[in-house]
Image: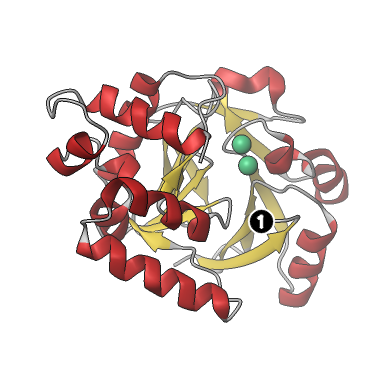
Amino acid sequence: MLDIHRIPVLKDNYVWLAHEPSADVTAVVDPAVAEPVEAALRDRGWRLTHILNTHHHGDHTGANLALKAAHGCTIVGPAADRARIPGIDVAVADGDRCRLGAAEAEVFDVPGHTRGHIAFWFAADRALFCGDTLFALGCGRLFEGTPDQMWRSLGKLRALPGDTRVFCAHEYTQSNARFALTVDGGNPALVRRAAEVDALRARGEPTVPSTIALERATNPFLRADERALALAVGLPPDDPVAVFAEVRRRKDSF
Ligand code: ZN
Ligand code: FE
């Protein structure tokens, strides 16, 4: 089983370490900065063998070259964006497998936030590393993709088993919750969750990872095919892409 450790960095980023003990290998997911990663590795006595990048943004790849120079680790990233991933060794795409000792991830192409965004799903561990595609109660901004692309990308993640843990790359949950209530305030599961998120943040605690089941029930960006969401944004209930696009547009200026 993977031992997964959180490293909060910068303003609101989460970098994740995933350690596979039987082979004594460790991956870092989306290393924004090197020093906190080095410190976490030292504390645990873990050896860095892999970098997994979900997309090219600097707050996800900033430490690639420094960590590779220090550890000689293998960098795995999206094939569709290989030219923008510093130091990339292995380019992967939808359906590829990525081994980490005895653990194995399936790769999903999830474009929308960037054109070459991928997610890593460790099925046996029920662990999803989804970068800036799916957030707790939110989704990434559409910098390089269309609403249709992002809706399909999120659909792949929504279809995973409900007990899948969602290790996203930012702690945006509290502001996401405030927005979610403006479009899905009649959803009792969302109202309950928003209160829980406020309580966690008041104690300075993280709200990530969440689960796919919880996101399906409460994340408005996974619920664009729900009648209540369509009604809330004044659109017909038979066009989830249009509803998704409108919800995303409103969030952009929230
Ligand atoms: Zn990003
Ligand atoms: Fe980011």
Is 153 above or below relative to 146? Answer: below
* Residue 109 appears in the figure: no
Q: Report which quarter residue 190 is drawn in.
A: bottom left
182 or 9, which is in the foreground?
Answer: 182
11 or 98, which is in the foreground?
Answer: 11
Q: Residues within 10 Å of mark 1 (few under 14, many from 20)?
A: few
85 to the left or right of 225: right
Q: Position of residue 91 (x, y in %)?
A: 58, 26
For the residue with label 1, is its CB less than 8 Å from the closest atom of ligand 2? no
Which residue is painted at 29% across and 55% down in the image?
A: 218
Which residue is painted at 63% across and 53% down in the image?
A: 27
Which residue is painted at 57% across and 38% down in the image?
A: 54
Amino acid type at mark 1: Asp
Q: How many marks?
A: 1
Is 78 above or below relative to 23? Answer: above
The quarter of the picture showing ligand 1: top right
Q: Position of residue 214 (x, y in %)?
A: 29, 60
Local secondary structure at mark 1: loop
Q: Position of residue 213 (x, y in %)?
A: 26, 58
Look at the image and name its color scheme: secondary structure
| Residue farthest bottom in this picture | 203
* Residue 4 appears in the figure: yes
Is 238 above or below relative to 57? Answer: above
Q: Position of residue 82 (x, y in %)?
A: 64, 21
Is 34 above or below relative to 154? Answer: below
61 to the left or right of 213: right
Which residue is painted at 49% across and 41% down in the image?
A: 98
232 or 80, which is in the foreground?
Answer: 232
Give the labeled residue for mark 1: 12
Q: Quadrant of the N terminus?
A: bottom left
